[in-house]
Image (cartoon, rainbow, N blue to C red):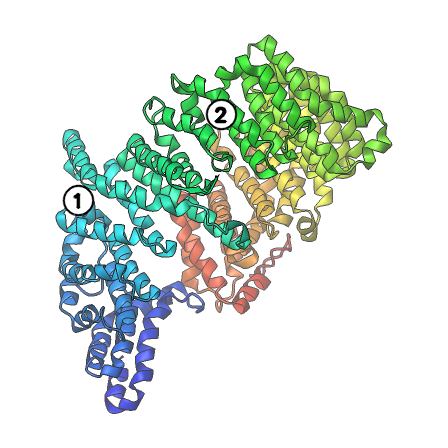
Amino acid sequence: MNWLRDEMNAHPDIVPSFLELLRVLPEEIFNYKIAARPDRRRKFENELASTMDVALGILTACLNIPELKEQALDAFSSWLRLRHRLPASVLATHPLVLTALSSLTSDELSEAAVDVISELIHYTSARNLEGFSVQMPLIQAIVPQVMNLKPQLRDSSKDEEDVKAIARLFADMGDSYVELIATGSDESMLIVHALLEVAAHPEYDIASMTFNFWHNLQICLIERESYVSLGNESLIDVERNRRVQVFRSSYESLVSLVSCKVQYPQDYSELSKEDQKDFKQTRYAVADVLIDAALVLGGEPTLKILYVKLVEALSGHQNGDMMDWRPSEAALYCIRAISDLVPLTEAEVMPQIMSLLPKLPHQSLLLQTGAYSKWLDAAQSGLSFLPSVIDILISGMSMSEDSAAAAALAFRHICDDCGKKLRGSLDGLFQIYQRAMTGEGSFKVAAQDSLHLVEALSIVITELPPDQAKKALEALCIPAVAPLQEVINQGPLVLGQKPAREITVHIDRLANIFRYVNNPEAVADAIQRLWPLFKAIFDTRAWDMRTMESLCRACKHAVRTSKRFMGVTIGAMLEEIQGLYKQHHQPCFLYLSSEVMKIFGSDPSCADYLKVLIESLFSNTACLLTKIQDFTSRPDIADDCFLLASRCIRYCPHLLFPSPVFPSLVECSMIGITVQHREASNSILSFLSDIFDLGRSSQGQQFISIRDSVIVPRGASITRILVAASTGALPSSRLETVAYALLALSRAYGANALEWAKESVSLIPVSAATDMEKSRFLQALSDAASGADIKGLTVPIEELSEVCRRNRTVQEIVQEALRPLELNLVYVS
């Protein structure tokens, strides 16, 4: 730095180049493309910080040359990223800061000045009011100058980029000083009013800059943690109420300002898919802001503001004889967004909204009518509105596929929350269901959306008395069972040749029935009755993954709902998938077995056939997955196999650990640890972690000796493969899972695990990782072995990982040394 200063003094012509170097130097601390070790990066930051006075002295001198001012300010903003290296009191009167503040209104320097002030605002942020007191001299210098820019937010002559830069400063102040602003002082309200002006800007990209502030302010106003310093509960309540009252009008204005931003544009259908996706994200973001506002104002006051918007939409948006549906849809979307915060006892506005629904154009409400289903269920007047709401939905099902989809979803919400009220209308609901399932009449409900109707009726059936529920469930199954039975009756050849979609559409409906009819006996009775039909499909189409996945999903939901009522059907089901897996290796058979283990694993009466099942499934899978290429080509089998294995450890360790298949399963997992497929790799690592953590569960402790007889002889290899996985054999996104497995291994095997780790780490050349970096890694494992909390030990593992991945050459050297794909590598001392 001194050298730079002397050279710039001696050779004025090189000053611009050296200024650029001054700007770039601090930025390099945060440039992770540079393959620097973490230690070196930290030292570099401290070295730079120690020269900060010299650097700022050079930049200050450059302010005297007008053509260098912009470059000097750009470099200054880079140096400010070295947080809290200079006291705020020093910066408050520093020439560079004063120049940036005075340049905010300069045409030539405003962009550079905004960058500096933005960095200064972040520089002065603090986590509590005490922290702000230290920063106050600088804050008091910044805020008045930024506030002077407020009129420019409305200046139509200003370029949009300039307005965006000014809005950014206000948003930065809001985000950084939110704890100060939350006190509700007169000065802080000036910033709030400016942020409301930003929120009012017609450009969404500018208005949305404030959204994070409104969310954080809501947390400061509502959550108790903001007031703990007051100590006394009554004082906390008084202060919270005072602050909420201060900000009430601001949040009321915010609701009005943002609610108009969700209206569909006139040309929405002509927008590109990307633009349509962006608009939907805009609506989600606005919904979040409305929820923040409702948390401060309360659900009822927010609802009243939005109801006024709905009435305005109805009265003021006529387009000839055709009503423009977009404003009313926007108002209803906003009303739906806050629905969970409106009390179910609300009796003033909600009845008026419900009475308006039939008057609205149907496009505007199909997505929204299900939002207040809880209110319809709880309110005294709710029952009187149900017929008109259901009529609206029925007409929606006849309009178009899109409106039918929205109507089916809303219908499901209504039945979900108003199931008890609708029990007496089951015949009418069945008529709607029949028409949708069979495609009779004018209904345009697509197969996927018909599942909402299946769910809706299933939920209502759950509310019936047991004897009625069984009959209703039979009737509910008929539209799905009849076409399947018809195909089966035509013989195996026809069944085998049908396109999968023609089969699965009906099975998926049965799956949803089993899932949502929460009546174990009725579902168990249904699955027992339907088992011959299911078996025929299993036997004929076991080769077809799509059909098998659909069928296993139906069986899974039947098992989950029926549980111990399944009786003999569960035995027949498991015998079927055990036999078929040997031939067809469908991963869904493993997944279905996982569900069975969860429910029946601890049942002594099921132990014999479950033991036969898992030994058959695991031995067949181990034969399939004998090299890493097998895992890569069939990651779904690996994923479901080790999910099943983890379920066995959790629910039936007495079946897995004494089994002769356990050692081969561990060997299989060692081969597949480094598979690149995320889910498969995570399942394998979780399986190993569950084995290492066996002693932490009371029912697992009795199997520790069996576990150790399998793991200890393989411990050195397992450790080496896990170290290789953490240092580059697996993506860095997988590091958390690998680190846990390493630490759990250390916790379980203590001194043995440390010895294995030392052997593995010693293979890494010093050119890749220093002895100090290896030592810190081993210390973390040693701490885990001594019983320290694993959560706090990951940093040294992350640092060794980063060091060994710092460039491709180093990563290749490390992997060549560790060779994770060789299970029995001989260590050479």
x then y, percent, for residue 325: 46, 40
- Identity of the residue drawn at 34% across and 34% down: 307
Query: Which image quarter: residue 812?
Result: bottom right
Towards the viewer: 154 or 685: 154
Lateral position of residue 78 relative to residue 609, left or right? left
Secondary structure, mark 1, is loop
Quick check: 554 left or right of 206?
right
Instruction: Specify the amino acid type for callout 1.
Output: Thr
Quarter placement of the C terminus: bottom right
Instruction: Say which residue label 2 marks.
Output: 389
Near mark 1 (Cα within 10 A), the count class, few <14, some 14-19 or many ≥20, is: many
- Of badges 2 and 1, the one in the foreground is 2
Task: Quickly name the residue at label 1.
Answer: 183
| CA distance separating discs 2 and 1 | 45 Å
Labels 2 and 1: the sequence-earlier one: 1
The answer to whether 126 appears left or right of 443 in the picture is: left
Say if residue 215 shows up in the picture.
no
Identified by mark 2, the residue type is Val
Q: Position of residue 675 (x, y in %)?
A: 62, 51
| Residue 159 appears anywhere in the view | yes
Of residues 327 and 768, the one nearer the viewer is 327
Which residue is rendered at x = 33% and y = 67% of the image? 159
User: At which x and y percent is residue 4?
Assistant: 28, 83
Image quadrant of residue 546?
A: top right
Q: Residue furthest top?
A: 467
